[in-house]
Image (tube, helix red, strand yellow):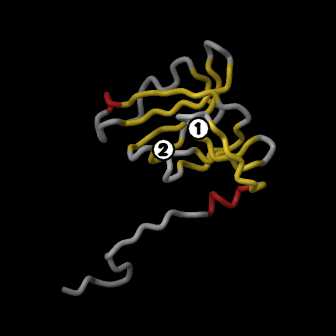
Amino acid sequence: MIPRNYLDGFSPQTLGQLVVFKGSLALVCFGKDLNEESDICCIWVMREYGVVESWTRSTVPLNNVERFFGSTDTDELLIETQDGQLVSFDPDSLNANSLEIRSPGWLFSTTDFMESLVLVDGENQD
């Protein structure tokens, strides 16, 4: 289950998206902080998988988010800004790095590759 109070003090602009962040399950949401009326990113991380009480929240200021694509292997957030730039954002250092890619909508059509020894269309041979 996602945290029951994940919207407390927060007005979401987008639906939350589940991602792997720092090796743990995370719920990432973008919206407004109702107390300070500023744009923020809320990152809820499940510290112990399957334990609802282990969700912890961190927030970082982040403006001009149009779309969120996911988290990288280096725990940066891939976002499209309102001016159409693809940006890699590090929530720990608050550094944003423009990747010089415009209109990155095609990223929704990509997939992750996972190596496996399981045969897709047949049985394993002993």
Which of the 4 image quarters holds residue 81?
A: top right
Q: Secondary structure at mark 2?
A: strand
Extreme residue toward the right, this view: 83
Residue 11's image quarter?
A: top right
The 10 Å Cα crowd at callout 2, few under 14, some 14 to 19, many 20 or more, is some
Image: 14 above or below 79? above
Residue underneath mark 1: 15
Residue 15: which quarter of the image?
top right
Where is residue 33 shown, x and y percent of the image? 62, 20
Q: Residue lying furthest top in this view?
A: 35
Q: Quadrant of the N terminus?
A: top left
- Give the residue furthest to the left: 126
Placement of 35 over or under 17, stated as above or below: above
Q: CA distance from mark 2 to mark 1?
A: 10 Å
Q: Which residue extends farthest bottom?
A: 125
Q: Amino acid at mark 1?
A: Leu
Kindly report which numbered mark, 2 or 1, lies closer to the viewer in this rendering: 2
Instruction: Name the residue nearer the viewer: 6 or 60.
Output: 60
Q: Residue at x 45, y 44 (%)?
A: 21
Q: Find residue 114 and report its horizontal and vertical position in percent.
A: 42, 67
Residue tagged 2: 18
* Residue type beneath disc 2: Leu
Taking the image as shown, residue 126 lies to the left or right of residue 8, namely left
